[in-house]
Image (spheres, grey):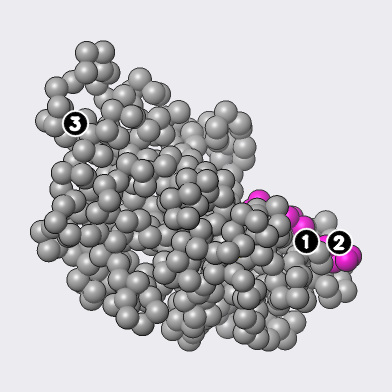
């Protein structure tokens, strides 16, 4: 029951958010977060958003991982830099 | 899928695998992933196969269903069988074996009104549909499920609901990590060199909550996300800290976790819950100040007080090794009944029930390899 994926917020009515989770739209509670906007990604647990994904931190993490990879080995011929943007 | 696919990149996994193999040399590294979500990810992606023989992953007790002792489950079953009561529970609890081969599922078959809910809001909705019945929410879990229970209690109090109570079994992660790190391997526990810390729990409590344990036991803790790249990177960070003799808390899940956690959720928890003096965990025994109870201001919503429930300690099934598995001393394949008498369809112990339980994760993703390797 602690397994969760980041869900994209599609719309907000009061404390209720409609999110897309693995291709399915569901309603969740946003009672535990402030400042959530449509388009944000949130970590959802038992029907509640617990945390908002910080896009800048996500980019920084992936940039550091890919930099370490490039330092360790030359990039493979058809590699895609970043990956995250393409995965949007 | 955004924020998922990028952390499953096989090229990154290869780089991390090589870096771990290069740096994890000259000693053994016993690393515990505390959280059952990580155990699940490790089994699902076969991450143990990517680690060098010097690194051992020890599966921890961070599975809410697994650590609840039989005595507490028996209390829920007893409650559910009382006339006029509707017991609302997360689905994972239904098949957990209680004493004498009992379970909530069997109680339901015997006529108890037990409803599976996906959120605390669904439990509250039942109070409106059934104003003449007492709805009890069977609250279990770590700091991820606690804030939703707190939200429901705050609503119930604000509305003055007379037919809603909570049977509170919420437990705390830091005291359990402290108890596990306190063992030196001679007292029936296992010595852990570093901890892969829970990602989702930390969205609520923050990385700061682990600093005391890391300091006290002089061993590193790295908070991790749940994708394979997250877990491999956390292992690498732990190996590096161990090699340098460091014992810091690092945030390997910074896209979701902040140092101070979720202030709004923590304030709600504080408003509704207080610490219990002690609480019994399956496998770990009684741990002081490791669980929550409703404060006096919420006494009217406390099922233990309203229904006069009393906890008795009940031993686990004789053949079941869940206790040792939750302490990291044994692996699922060490259990004689694993995969034969005990399967997810017919679990004898709690570790075989939810997908975060070590036995269930091994059964679903790796049992043939693991059994073959240890046979
Ligand atoms: S396989 Fe079943 S009986 Fe054995 S330890 Fe796991 S849950 Fe318990």
Distance Cα–Cα, label 3 vs label 2: 56 Å
Badge 2 density bin: few <14, some 14–19, many ≥20, Cα 10 Å:
few
Please say whether residue B322 is one of the residues in the magenta stretch. no
Disc 3 target residue:
A69
Q: Residue at x 48, y 49 (%)?
A: B372
Q: Residue at x 57, y 53 (%)?
A: B360
Q: Quadrant of the N terminus of chain B?
A: top left
The kind of secondary structure element at disc 3 is helix
B241 and B316: which is toward the camera: B316
Disc 2 target residue:
B109
Q: Residue at x 62, y 65 (%)?
A: B349
**Mark 3 belongs to chain:** A
Disc number for residue B105: 1
A59 and B227: which is toward the camera: B227
- Can residue B295 be seen in the rendering of this structure? yes
Q: Is mark 1 within 8 Å of ligand 1?
A: no
The part of the image, by quadrant, that contains residue B145 is: bottom right
**Mark 1 belongs to chain:** B
Distance Cα–Cα, label 2 vs label 1: 6 Å
Badge 1 density bin: few <14, some 14–19, many ≥20, Cα 10 Å:
some
Residue at the extreme top: A78
Give the extent of the magenta segment. B108-125
């Amino acid at each position: 029951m602690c397994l969760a994926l980041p869900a994209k917020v599609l719309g907000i009515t009061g404390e209720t958010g409609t999110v897309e989770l693995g291709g399915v739209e569901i309603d969740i509670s946003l009672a535990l977060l402030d400042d959530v906007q449509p388009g944000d990604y949130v970590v959802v647990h038992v029907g509640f958003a617990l945390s908002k994904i910080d896009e800048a931190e996500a980019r920084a993490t992936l940039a550091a991982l890919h930099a370490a990879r490039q330092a360790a080995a030359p990039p493979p011929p058809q590699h895609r830099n970043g990956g995250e943007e393409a995965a949007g | 899928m955004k924020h998922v696919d990028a952390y499953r990149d096989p090229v990154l996994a290869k780089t991390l695998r090589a870096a771990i193999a290069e740096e994890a040399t000259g000693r053994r590294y016993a690393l515990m992933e505390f959280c059952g979500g990580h155990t699940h990810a490790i089994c699902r992606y076969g991450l143990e196969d990517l680690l060098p023989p010097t690194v051992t992953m020890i599966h921890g007790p961070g599975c809410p269903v697994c650590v609840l002792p039989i005595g507490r489950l028996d209390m829920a079953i007893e409650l559910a069988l009382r006339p006029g009561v509707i017991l609302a529970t997360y689905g994972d609890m239904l098949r957990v074996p209680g004493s004498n081969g009992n379970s909530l599922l069997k109680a339901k078959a015997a006529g108890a009104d037990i409803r599976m809910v996906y959120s605390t809001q669904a439990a509250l909705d039942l109070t409106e549909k059934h104003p003449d019945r007492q709805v009890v929410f069977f609250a279990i879990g770590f700091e991820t499920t606690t804030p939703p229970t707190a939200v429901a209690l705050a609503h119930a109090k604000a509305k003055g609901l007379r037919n809603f109570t909570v049977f509170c079994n919420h437990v705390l992660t830091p005291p359990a990590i402290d108890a596990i790190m306190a063992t030196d391997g001679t007292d029936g526990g296992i010595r852990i060199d570093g901890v892969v810390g829970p990602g989702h729990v930390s969205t609520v409590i923050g990385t700061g909550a682990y600093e005391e344990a890391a300091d006290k036991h002089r061993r590193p803790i790295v908070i991790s996300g749940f994708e394979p790249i997250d877990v491999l990177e956390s292992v690498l960070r732990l190996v590096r800290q161990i090699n340098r003799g460091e014992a810091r808390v690092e945030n390997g899940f910074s896209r979701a976790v902040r140092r101070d956690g979720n202030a709004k959720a923590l304030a709600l928890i504080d408003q509704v819950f207080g610490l219990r003096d002690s609480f019994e965990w399956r496998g770990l025994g009684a741990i002081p100040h490791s669980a929550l109870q409703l404060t006096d201001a919420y006494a009217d919503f406390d099922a233990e007080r309203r229904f006069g429930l009393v906890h008795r300690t009940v031993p686990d099934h004789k053949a079941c090794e869940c206790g040792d598995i939750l302490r990291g001393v044994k692996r699922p394949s060490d259990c004689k009944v694993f995969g034969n008498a005990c399967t997810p369809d017919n679990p004898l112990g709690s570790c075989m029930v939810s997908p975060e339980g070590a036995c269930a994760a091994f059964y679903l993703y790796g049992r043939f390899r693991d059994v073959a390797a240890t046979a």
